[in-house]
Image (cartoon, coloured by chain):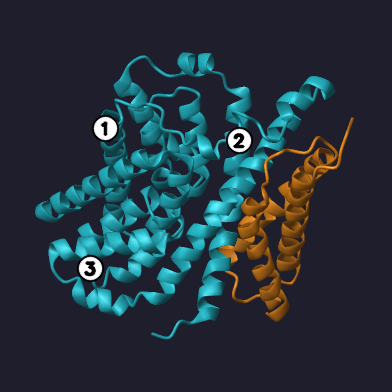
Amino acid sequence: MLINLDKIIITFINMILEGLPFLLIGSIVSAAIQLFVTEEMIEKVLPQNNIISLLIASTIGILMPICECAIIPVTKSLIRKKVPIKIAITFMLSVPILNPIVIMSTYYAFNDMKIVLIRFIGGIILSIIIGVLVDILVSKNKDIVNRKTEYSDLCECGCLTIDYFTRKSKLRICLEHSIREFLNILKYYIYASFLSSIFICLIDENMLIKIGKGKFISIIIMMLMAFLFSLCSEADAFVAKEFLKHFNIPAISAFLILGPMMDLKNAVIISSYFKKEFTIKLIGAIIICILSFSLLLSAIM
Amino acid sequence: MKKFNVNEFVSLLILILLEMEIGLMLFTRDNNAHIELESIRGLYIVFLLIPILIYVQFLKVFTFNSRKDNSNNFLPIVLTLFVIAVFLVVA
């Protein structure tokens, strides 16, 4: 098979450029949470009732126009600040789907409220179910953050020691941490984008369309494409619309829900930020839940 | 006692290079038809934010040297910036 190197490089560069603003904003927000938000503040803000907390975590994305690349460092900071895992995971999975830009782009792409509602409501329900499921699965070991990629415990940037002498402002320390977080996540984003761009250029979509005729197989094929293509949640609806000619709505909904929750790019970043065992459980839970949801949808429709 | 911190200096160079490449992309965008318009819009935010980070990073260059070798961490970023630079020159 002839590899088109130009196409791979252009796809790779476009993926990096597309993600850069979100990575930068996510890093700044993550550093700000680390520095300005205390565990006591979170305890005060989070409702005592778990159901209300989960509902808030699953719908707060409507107010946050950020996509999946930015939300992972933010989630890691929230977990470090002792936010319950189920709430942090629900928040991480729902924000990229409920993001207002994603809702609008889905509507513009399909011009069909049914698909928007399936994506929107499916995103809320599935993020809560997966959040709770993952929380149960990791109940024995709640320490899920990968300490190897953590810079803040033994701060290599030296802000803790140097701050003792120079008395830096909190804003400056926040920006210094943002730079570290940004360069740290950028490295993993580069690995993931490179892998995804290779897959995008190697996979023959027409062949997949030919294979994906049955109900079950079509859902699996669309989920595979969502995972490997690692499209930004703000643009994936336009790609999904092209597949509507060949696949049914349940398969399209699997593509639209899985992409923002878990793709190759996210999997690499999550596995670098969280422990491997947790990452495997999370990916497994997401795949099983979305597959079940799409099969249920296919039985109803 | 302040020293020259090589790791922080490399981080500073990366940020400066990134800013230069984004600036070049934004101001010569007519020549870069391969880059998607959606990406260009978001890059304005990066272009405005990075100078602040460059200033903060510059202040960190003259600090104590970390004992940890970070050269491997920077390698993928430096290679990517190199690929983008080559792409900009060729395109």
Nearest to N terminus: mark 1 or mark 3: 1
Q: Badge 1: few (under 14), some or many (20 or more) residues near its Cα, within 10 Å?
A: some
Coordinates of residue A244 in the picture (x, y in percent): 27, 68
Front residue of A143/A119: it is A143
Quarter of the rendering containing residue A98: top left
Q: In terms of depth relative to the viewer, which is nearer, A186 or B78?
A: B78
Name of the residue lying farthest toward the right = B1
Q: Secondary structure at mark 1?
A: helix
Closer mark to the observer between disc 2 and disc 1: 2
Q: Which residue is most to the front?
A: B67
B38 left or right, relative to A62: right
Task: Name the foreground residue: A98 vs B22.
Answer: B22
Graded by Cα atoms within 10 Å as few (under 14), some (14 to 19) or many (20 or more), the crowding at tag 3 reads many
Residue type of the residue flagged with mark 1:
Leu
Secondary element under disc 2, as helix, strand or loop, is loop
The residue sitting at 36% across, 23% down in the picture is A53
Q: Position of residue B35 (x, y in %)?
A: 60, 70
Q: Colour of chain A?
A: cyan
> For mark 1, what is the residue?
A137
Q: Position of residue A79 (x, y in %)?
A: 46, 28
In the structure shown, which secondary structural element does the residue marked by tag 3 occupy? loop
Q: Is residue A69 above or below residue A7?
A: above
Quadrant housing residue B2: top right
Q: Chain B colour?
A: orange
Question: Which residue corresponds to mark 3?
Answer: A247
